[in-house]
């Protein structure tokens, strides 16, 4: 198939608007998969099927005959959620057009807006598809108006991906409205690395988009980023699983692996350009992709310290194909050895948490409350690249590394926290929704940027601290809008903040892993919640246990766990240090699930209960 008859396009949509279902229908229609049943072929990860969301972009090549000519179509199903924006914009790099799928009963939602602008910025030709027209409360005319009004998009294709109604009109629209890829098979090979994953049988597999030239098995090629040289072992297309072909030509997207294989997956730098060995001078490499930044962090600890290795294996296994997760060892006095994990956003974090619990096994895992990076601007200055004096900055992703009070007082200029620009859509009716949402945003230190009424919808834009978002903001938003609100956000940089470190103390000893950086205005409420919650999980002991929440030396909240009723044993052993030590050692040798905070022995179950998010 010549390049004029290739089309590379992606499907973008708000979650649940029918992206995966439509992709399935298109694969059936082209005979790529057998019709019938619910496939969600492109959702390969278990978590994607379980949660019904797409996390990793998935691709598939289709052959399609249009007006007597064969076309090679390449479809990319992209994640709808903002956390995976890097993934999404990477996959756009292989496309020239996009199907913008909108649910006929819901209209434009937060992620429709976000994905539209992302795709628009990358110059993709957009074809609006109004899906679910079979629904009784579908309002295709209103959504058509909305698409025109919001995005100036005309001529939507009306379909029902579920019943198959009019799905046949989609691919002709792609052929007519999406431009063919540019490029020439006669030019030297220029190939972009879009994605990579690890396969047990083949090792590191690459997903590439060939821009110019032709690449074949046995070709000697070179990474223009790392300068490493490789020999192409096998290449082909996803159809929908890997199918070897003799070559990949300009315009095509396909997989390949090397022989001998790439040593580690980190050699596969997404956004890297490959060329034929010896042709480096003739090829202008691509600029590469921006490295996504981790914005949400948690600590993960095995309840039983003997299982640290097992936890490490599970984490390594899961991060093999998701290198946007940052990992570092962490040691906590209260929870022992564990890991500090960094994620792109809150959904990314919770999806991983689910997978880790599955992989590692049930309840044997402690995960600390999510936090965000804080920026410390020191009074001290350093020289930047141009040699000019600028304030020294440190990013802190672990409350344990937060400077002591006196250091803050004497050496720190200011502390900043990350903000996001959030887009929220809600129905205009009932009108109370708007009031509730504004209230919620204000409670969460939000600043309104925009408020637009759009026929039956309201679109709000707020600048919000990311820290507020990780505290189940979306859950609360859904709660006050009967599930109708949608949320999307983008990075809005760091802003000055009044940050304090809140600590939980057990008989005056801080429990390090529970400490949290928070805004001064929420410290007291959080502190009171902490002490009550922790108390409910701590067993009575032979002496009184005082639980406090404090900022530095200032105690904000306090609860007491009463001692057992005084009896002979308590009198005899209550304060006996050696006996308590013996008890602790005995239990340590046994289940190893007890921890000592000062003189208090605490069952790991208490931490587990305390840290469980409900
Ligand atoms: P995605 O999150 O955009 O990939 O959405 P899915 O393809 O997973 O679809 C979300 C839900 O909507 C699923 O329960 C589908 O069965 C349903 N759905 C998809 N297309 C249609 C349609 O045309 N009509 C109806 N009634 N339901 C649909
Ligand atoms: Mg999906």
Image (cartoon, rainbow, N blue to C red):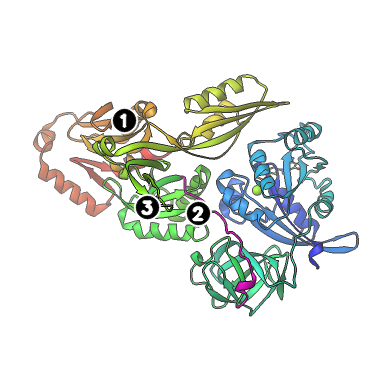
- Depth check: give the residue in front, 55 or 572: 55
Residue 281 is a magenta residue:
yes
In the displayed orientation, state which residue is furthest to the front: 387
Residue drawn at x 60%, y 66% is 273
Which is more foreground, mark 3 or mark 1? 3
- Depth check: give the residue in front, 601 or 123: 123
Q: Residues within 10 Å of mark 3 (few under 14, many from 20)?
A: many
Spot occupied by residue 6 in the image (x, y as percentages of width and height)? 78, 62
The reply to whether the residue tagged 2 has its Cβ within 8 angstroms of ligand 2 is: no
Spot occupied by residue 107 in the image (x, y as percentages of width and height)? 72, 34
Dot 1 falls on a residue whose secondary structure is helix
In which quadrant of the rendered view does residue 16 lie? top right
Residue drawn at x 80%, y 43% is 159
Give the quarter the ligand 1 occupies: top right
Spot occupied by residue 559 in the image (x, y as percentages of width and height)? 27, 27
Q: Earlier in the sequence, mark 2 or mark 3?
A: 2
Residue 55 is a magenta residue:
no
- Depth check: give the residue in front, 456 or 430: 456
Q: Earlier in the sequence, mark 1 or mark 2?
A: 2
Dot 3 falls on a residue whose secondary structure is strand
User: In this rendering, does residue 292 appear at all?
Assistant: yes
* Label 1 with label 2: CB-CB less than 8 Å: no
Residue 324: image tag: 2
* Label 2 with label 3: CB-CB less than 8 Å: no
Please state the extent of the stretch shown in magenta in the rendering.
278-295
**Residue bearing the label numbered 3:** 339
Alpha carbon of mark 1 to alpha carbon of mark 2: how far? Answer: 35 Å
Alpha carbon of mark 2 to alpha carbon of mark 3: how far? Answer: 16 Å
Task: Locate residue 136 relative to residue 614 in the image: left or right.
Answer: right
**Residue bearing the label numbered 1:** 531
Residue drawn at x 42%, y 50% is 341
């Amino acid at each position: 198939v010549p390049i004029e008859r290739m089309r590379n396009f992606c499907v973008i949509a708000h979650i649940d608007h029918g992206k995966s279902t439509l992709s399935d229908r298109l694969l059936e229609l082209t005979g790529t998969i057998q019709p019938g049943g619910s496939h969600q072929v492109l959702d390969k990860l278990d978590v994607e099927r379980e949660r019904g969301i797409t996390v990793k972009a998935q691709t598939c090549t289709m052959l399609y005959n249009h007006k007597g000519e064969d076309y090679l179509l390449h479809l990319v199903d992209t994640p709808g959620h903002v956390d995976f924006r890097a993934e999404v914009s990477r996959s756009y790099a292989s496309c020239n057009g996009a199907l913008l799928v909108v649910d006929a009963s819901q209209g434009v939602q937060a992620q429709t807006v976000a994905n539209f602008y992302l795709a628009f910025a990358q110059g993709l030709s957009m074809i609006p598809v109004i899906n679910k027209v079979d629904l009784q409360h579908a309002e295709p005319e209103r959504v058509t108006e909305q698409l025109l009004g919001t995005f100036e998009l005309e001529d939507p294709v009306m379909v029902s991906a579920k019943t198959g109604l009019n799905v046949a009109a989609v691919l002709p629209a792609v052929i007519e409205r999406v431009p063919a890829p540019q490029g020439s098979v006669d030019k030297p090979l220029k190939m972009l690395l879009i994605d990579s994953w690890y396969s047990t049988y083949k090792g590191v597999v690459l997903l590439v988009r060939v821009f110019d030239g032709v690449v074949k098995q046995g070709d000697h090629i070179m990474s223009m980023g790392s300068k490493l040289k490789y020999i192409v072992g096998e290449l082909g297309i996803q159809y929908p699983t890997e199918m070897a072909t003799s070559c990949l030509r300009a315009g095509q997207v396909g997989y390949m692996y090397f022989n001998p294989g790439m040593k580690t997956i980190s050699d596969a730098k997404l956004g890297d350009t490959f060329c034929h060995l010896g042709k480096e001078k003739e090829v202008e490499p691509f600029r590469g992709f921006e490295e996504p930044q981790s914005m949400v962090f948690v600590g993960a600890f095995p309840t039983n310290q003997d299982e640290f290795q097992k936890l490490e294996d599970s984490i390594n296994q899961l991060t093999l194909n998701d290198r946007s997760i940052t990992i570092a060892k962490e040691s906590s006095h209260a929870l022992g050895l564990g890991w500090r994990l960094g994620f792109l956003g809150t959904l990314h974090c919770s999806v991983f948490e689910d997978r880790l619990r599955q992989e590692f096994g049930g309840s044997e895992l402690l995960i600390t409350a999510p936090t965000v990076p804080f920026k410390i601007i020191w009074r001290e200055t350093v020289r930047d690249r141009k040699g000019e004096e600028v304030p020294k900055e440190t990013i802190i992703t672990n409350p344990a590394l937060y400077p002591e009070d006196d250091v803050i007082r004497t050496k720190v200029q200011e502390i900043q926290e990350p903000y996001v620009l959030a887009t929220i859509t809600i129905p205009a009716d009932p009108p109370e929704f708007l009031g509730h949402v504004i209230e919620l945003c204000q409670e969460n230190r939000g600043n309104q940027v925009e408020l637009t009424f759009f026929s039956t919808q309201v679109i709000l834009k707020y600048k919000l601290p990311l820290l507020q978002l990780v505290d189940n903001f979306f859950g609360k938003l859904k709660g006050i809008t009967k599930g109708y609100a949608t949320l999307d956000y983008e990075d809005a940089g760091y802003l000055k903040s009044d940050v304090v470190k809140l600590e939980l103390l057990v008989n005056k000893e801080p429990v390090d892993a529970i400490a949290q950086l928070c805004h001064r205005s929420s410290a007291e409420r959080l502190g009171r919640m902490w002490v009550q919650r922790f108390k409910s999980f701590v067993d009575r002991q032979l002496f009184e246990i005082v639980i406090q929440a404090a900022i530095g030396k200032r105690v904000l909240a306090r609860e007491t766990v009463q001692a057992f009723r005084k009896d002979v044993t308590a009198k005899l052993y209550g304060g006996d240090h050696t006996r308590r030590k013996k008890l602790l050692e005995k239990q340590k040798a046994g289940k190893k699930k007890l921890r000592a905070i000062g003189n208090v022995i605490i069952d790991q179950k208490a931490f587990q209960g305390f840290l469980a998010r409900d």
